[in-house]
Amino acid sequence: IFFWFSFHQNGLTLTYFAKDYTDLSGIVINLGFVTIKGAEIFQSINPIFIVLLTPIIMGVFGWLRAKGKEPSTPKKIAIGMLIAASAYIVMAIGSFSLPLKSEVDAMGGLADANRVTPFLLIGTYFILTVAELFISPLGISFVSKVAPPQYQGIMQGGWLGATAIGNQLLFIGAILYESIPIWMTWSVFVVACLLSMSTMLFMLKWLERVAK
């Protein structure tokens, strides 16, 4: 739940950040029949990275498997949560000197010269996509593997339910974004991802044992 609450901020607070704090002056996509510009462009970055990075990440897993060094699925998921935390650490560092959202509104918006480079968000989306590839494709299959046959449907529903609950909690990110320094908002997501990782590590030996 904590992980999905943090990860899916790419459709909420990260988009707000693109609109309020990111220099969008050079971000334009001309498709001929339509020109796309503005913060919404960043919504396409994650799908693009998914397509580009999936064969690479899966190839790395295959290479490690061939050498007998592939991490277990629970370890991959824990690593993915750590990677997600690092994405928000990058955002916190990049946002440290930025004013409060209320101050930005009072100024009528930030001038382009005071906005951050779009590469901050692009890099963050890259890291979050890597984290997603460590977690999302593996989680549901792992649940199916370790659940007793008579409870597989319930356990798979539990995984999807946790994802849904995390999505329902997204509004908390929007509240934080509006009320506290922006770097502190990202720090909350860092803590959420690290809590998820710590929970997974606490259960690691048991999960690896039942998966055998």
Image (spheres, rainbow, N blue to C red):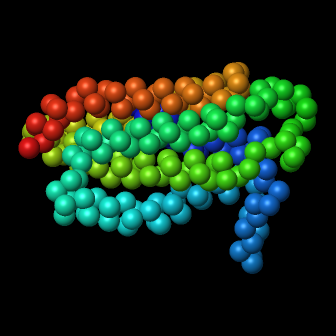
Note whether 64 is above or below 113 in the view shown.
below
x%, y% of residue 116? 76, 45
Q: Is residue 161 left or right of residue 35?
A: left
- How far across and how far down the image is residue 212, in percent? 8, 44
Identified at 10% across, 37% down, the residue is 210
Q: Residue at x 58, y 58 (%)?
A: 45
Locate residue 85, reporting x and y percent: 48, 36
Q: Nearer the viewer, residue 146 or 171?
A: 146
Quadrant assignment, res 88 = top right
108 over 123 or under it: above or below: above
**Is 97 placed above or below 40 here?**
above
Can residue 173 be seen?
A: no
Q: Residue at x 75, y 31 (%)?
A: 97
Task: Say which residue appears at 79% left-offset and 29% top-offset.
Answer: 99
Quarter of the rendering occupied by the N terminus: top left
Q: Where in the figure is residue 141, as x and y percent of width and height?
A: 23, 49
What residue occupies the far top of the structure in this picture?
A: 179
Closest to the observer: 8 or 67?
67
Can residue 10 be spotted in the picture? yes
Quarter of the image holding residue 188?
top right
- In the image: residue 209, left or right of residue 9: left
